Image: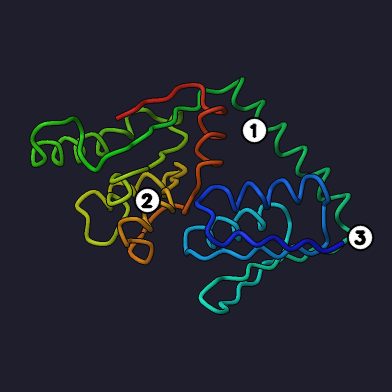
Amino acid sequence: MSVKIDCKGLPCPQPVLKCKNAIESDNPAKIKIIVDNEAAKENVSRFMGTKGYEVSIKEKDGAFVVKGKKDVSESADKQECEVCEVMSVEEIAQVGSKTLVFLNSEFLGSGDDKLGAGLMFNFLSTLPELGDSLWRIIMVNSAVKLATEGHKCLEKIQNLEKSGVSVLVCGTCLDHFGLLDKKQVGETTNMLDVVTSLQLATKVIKA
């Protein structure tokens, strides 16, 4: 079975949600999603990859055609593995502490931006003190600038990722600021990942 969905003009995370719904309802051997922005291209292709599809991307007439293909003979085994993975994540969320840090600005606090920039640097420098409970950092709005080339805080976030902390950076936000090609750390993400992460976390720190 093959599925084709035209998502041109749809803001993130709608293309990902349409892709998710099609895969969950039809389990197609081939799926083609057409999007018209970089953030949607990255998010859809990454989502397909997590579902066991071999992904290819072509640019055509100002849009991106994201194709996914998987071996039908292996689909049943992969579905079983995916169910196991979901169950294990939920079990971990119930048993262990999973602290999520949610950043929505490149500054910490409001008022003086110079002070706020310094406070954010100190905050990220101190996050390792949370130890193994620190699970994920999500960046939205201007916080995505922290993950880009040349930012003072970039090295701190890279060190956190190297230590095993998951870093998710909003693709729509990167696109808005024209920074998609400047991202140096983390995975480009979408609102579906954000909502799911908030659901799985045992503790959320908003800074």
Q: Nearer the viewer, residue 205 or 125?
A: 205
Q: Quadrant of residue 174?
A: bottom left
Q: Type of residue at label 2?
A: Cys
Q: How is the image coloured?
A: rainbow
Which image quadrant: the C terminus? top left
How many C-alpha atoms fall within 10 Å of the one at disc 3: few (<14), some, or many (≥20)? Answer: few
Name the residue: 72% across, 31% down: 87
Q: Secondary structure at mark 3?
A: helix
Badge 3 amino acid = Ser
Tell me the crowding category of disc 2: few under 14, some 14 to 19, or many 20 or more residues within 10 angstroms, Cα based.
Answer: many
| Image location (x, y in percent) of residue 5 | 69, 60
Characterize the local packing of mark 1: few (<14), some (14-19) or many (20 or more) Cα atoms within 10 angstroms.
few
Closer to the N terminus: mark 1 or mark 2? 1
Q: Earlier in the sequence, mark 3 or mark 2?
A: 3
Which numbered marker is on residue 73? 3
Image height of 169 relative to 38, above or below: above
**Relative to 133, is 156 on the left or the right?**
left
Disc 2 element: helix
Q: Position of residue 199 (x, y in %)?
A: 56, 27
Residue 109 position in % (x across, y down) = 19, 30
Tag nearer the camera, 1 or 2: 2
